[in-house]
Image (cartoon, grey):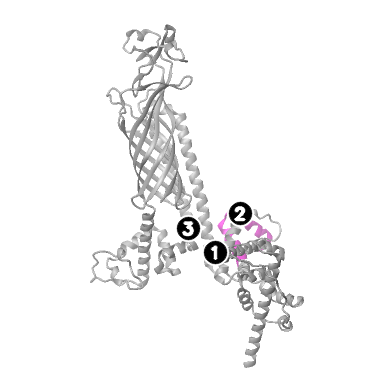
Amino acid sequence: MENQELEKIIKDCSKGKSKAQELLYREFAPKMLGVCLRYSNDLSEAEDTLQDGFIKVFQSIKSYQFKGSFEGWIRRIMVNTALERFRKSKNMQVVDEIWEPDPDPEPEESIQNADIPLDALLQMIQGLPDRYQMVFSLYVLDGYTHNEIAEVMDITVGTSKSNLARGRAILKQKVNDFLSEKENKLKIC
Amino acid sequence: MLDENKHIDSLFADGLKGMSVEPKPEVWNAISGKMLAARRKRRGVIVFISAALAASVLLFFGIQNRNLFISEPGLVPMQQLSDQVSETNQAKNTDKTIETETATAEQEEVMLSKESVQDFVASNELFAGRNITKETTVVHDNRLQKESIMASIPMSVGVLSNSANTIPESLQYIGVDKLSVITLSAEDLIVMNNLMAMEQAKKDELRKNRWAIIGQITSAYSNEESAASANSGIVSFGGGVKVNYALGEKLAFQTGFMYNRIGQDFGGGSQNLVFSDANALEGSNKDEGASYGLEVLPSNSTAGNIRYKNLETRDASQAEYLLTSNFGSSEELMQSFETIEVPFLLRYSLSQKRLGVYVSGGFGANWIIDNGVYRTSGSKQKIGEIDNLRTTNFSSLFGLGFEYNLSPKIQIGLEPSFKYYLNSINKSSEFNYKPYSIGIHTGIRYNF
C-alpha cells in the first residue's frame, strides 16, 4: 500500500468511516495476528487479542501523528493489548529470580543450521511458561530492552534477565529435542 | 554462551518476525460490530442531550411567552406547544429510524459480539453451541420475525422434545394434543427451544428488576387556565420520590409522593377592592389610595376571595363610587399553593435501549398543605390567604420521558410533563380555578 493511500485511509478512519477501517484491517491484520500469536497460547486467544487491539487502534487513531512507521504504531498497540490481557488473565505473581548459567551448554552447531518449520517454532514459544514467553517475545522478537520489559511487566530488570535466560534454555532444549526426533525419523526412513 | 544465545534468538527472530497469518472472517465481523455499537452509543448520548436541550428551550419559551397562554385561556398556546413537541419527537424518531435502518443495512452480516454470545450462553446452558446462538441472535434482533416463528410453532411441540432438548415443564404448552404430532426438524426444535429459553430469561430478568425507586426534582411553570390578562404564572421547584413497579416488559405503574407549588402573580385592577389602613402595614408601599390614608388591595383573585391577615380591611367591592373614582390597586401580589401529590401513573416504554424513551399518563391526588397571598413589591411578605379552598384535588398528568442507562441498575432521566387540575380548587361555584403546570422532572432511578 502506498504512503498516500495509507494516509488517506488513516484520515478516513479517524473520521470513523467503516469502509476505511475495513481496508486498514485487511492490510495489517495478518501481520498483527503473527505478532499476537507470539504472545498467546493458541490461535483463538491470539484472535481475541487482535480483535481488542484493532478496536483500540480505531478508537485512538486520531492520536496518530504521522510520525514514524504506522505499522510500528499498530504493533505497539497489539503488544500492549497482549500484555494487558496477560496481566488480567494470569494475575501475575512474579518472584525475583537469579539466573545461574547452565554449566554444560549444548553444542551450537546443530541449532545454528537448524531447519525448523514456522509452526514448530511458534508452538515452542507458545509452550513456554507464560512469563518466559512474554519476556522472550518482547526482548528477542520485538526489541524491547530489559528496562522496558521491567516497566511494562512490572518486574525488576534482574527478573526480566532471569526469565529470558530460562526461556532461552527451555527453547534450546525444545529445539534439540525437535532436531533429534527429526534425525531419528530420517534414520528410520 | 553469548554466541549461543544469539543463535537461538536469531533462529526464532528470523522465523517469526515477519510471520503473517490470515485471521478468520469472524474477527472482523466482531470488530465492526463493536465499533457500530460504540457509534450507536455515542448517537444515543447526543440524542439524549439534544432532547434535554430541546425540553429546556421549550420551557424557557413557554415562560417567556406566557401571555400566549393567558390571552386564549390556555387552549391554543398549549395546542401549539404540544404540536411543536410532537413534531420534534416525530422528527427525532424518524431520524433515529433512518439511522437504525442504515446501520442495519451496513451490517447485515455482523456477527454477535463476544459479550452477547457469552450472556446468552450463560442464560441457556443447554444450547451453548456457537451456531445455535448465532441463529438465535438474528431472531432476537428482529422481534417481528421472532413473533412469526413463535406463532408458527405447533402446540404439540412439547411431545417432540427429547432428553437433549428438554423444554422446561413451566414452558410446555398446556392442553397439548399428543396424538397430532407434527414432524419438526432438529434445527426447528433448537430454534424453538432457544426462543423459549430467551423468553424465560426475559421474564426472569423482568421479575428481578420489577421494582425501582426514582428520586426526582422538578422545575415547573404554573398558571391557571382562565387567568385574566393581568395575571401571569410562576416558576417553582419541587420534587419527591416515586416507586416504579413493572407490570410487563414495557408497561409499569408508578406512585409516590411529590411536593409541588402552583400559583400566579396578580395585582392591579380598579374593581373588587378592599381598603385597609395603610399605616397598619409595616414597610408597605403606598399607592394612589394611600393619599387618603388607605391602602387599596384586591378583594379576591381568580382562585377565590382573599382573607387578609393582620389588616383592618373594609370591603369596597360593591361601592358605586369606585366606578367613577381613581381608586385602584397597584400592589404586586402573588398567590401560591403548596401541595403534596400522590401520582398514579402508567408508563409505557417506546424504546428500551441504552437511551430509553417512554410516555406516561395518569392522575394525581393533590393535598394543599399551604396557601398564601404574598405582597411581592419590595420584599416578599405573606399578607393573607385564599378562602374556602378544597383540600383534596385531582389532576391529570402526561409526560414524555428519556432515560439513560448508566448501569443495569442505575438510570438518569429527564421528563417534560404537563399537569392539569380536573376540578376547581375553590369550593365556591363563584370561582372556577383549574391550574395547570408545565414542568421538567430530572432524576435518578435505581432498580432493585
Callouts 2 and 1 in the same chain: no
Q: What residue type is labelled 1?
A: Trp
Q: Which amino acid does label 3 sit on?
A: Ala
Residue A121 is situated, as x and y percent measured from the top left of the image, at: 64, 77
Residue B227 is situated, as x and y percent measured from the top left of the image, at: 37, 25
Q: Which of marks 1 and 3 is in front?
A: 1
Kindly give the residue lying farthest to the bottom in the view shown. A188
A152 displayed left or right of B413: right
Q: Can residue B308 be seen in this view?
A: yes
B32 displayed left or right of B82: right
For label 3, count other residues whose C-alpha is less than 10 Å away and answer few (under 14), some (14-19) or many (20+).
Answer: few
Residue B371 is situated, as x and y percent measured from the top left of the image, at: 37, 26
**Mark 3, chain letter?**
B
Which residue is under mark 2? A14
Which residue is under mark 1? B28
Which residue is under mark 3? B105
**Mark 2, chain letter?**
A
